[in-house]
Amino acid sequence: MRLISSDLALKAVVALSATAELTLSELARATGATPSAAHRALGILRDDGIVERREERRSGYSLASTERAGHVAALAVEAIPFGTAVAIGARANRAVEFVARE
């Protein structure tokens, strides 16, 4: 499992756990990565069965509905500093308009 050594892949899991689906560009914005780096992180996550690609309407990505993906999401939230995880989740979720930090 390569994702453990990829900080960006863990950040991508945090972003995807904050919303139902993200496009590549939305994921890159949420994680602060370039689209090519986000694409590589998604490749790691797809290879490990953590992320699924949705082809229905807008070619987005979502966390797989598996126990393994749930464990990885819990690990990602623990591994990423709290403030960083909150910022990623806020950028990933369109319903969040404002996040205050001290």
Image (tube, rainbow, N blue to C red):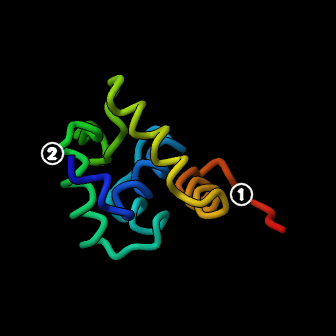
Could you tell whether 10 is left or right of 85 in the image?
left
Marking on residue 47: 2
What is the three-letter code of the residue carrying label 2? Asp
Quadrant (top left, top right, bottom left, bottom right) of the C terminus: bottom right
Q: Position of residue 48 (x, y in %)?
A: 20, 42
Q: Position of residue 1 (x, y in %)?
A: 21, 46
Marking on residue 97: 1
Residue at 49%, 38% in the rendered image: 74
Callout 1: helix, strand or loop?
A: loop
Number of marks present in the image shown: 2
Q: Against 75, is 67 above or below?
A: above
Residue, far left? 47
Crowd rating for badge 2 (residues with CA inside 10 Å; few <14, some 14–19, many 20+): some
Callout 2: helix, strand or loop?
A: helix
Q: Position of residue 46 (x, y in %)?
A: 20, 45
Residue at 32%, 29% in the rendered image: 68
What is the three-letter code of the residue carrying label 1? Glu
Q: Earlier in the sequence, mark 2 or mark 1?
A: 2
Q: Position of residue 24 (x, y in %)?
A: 32, 60
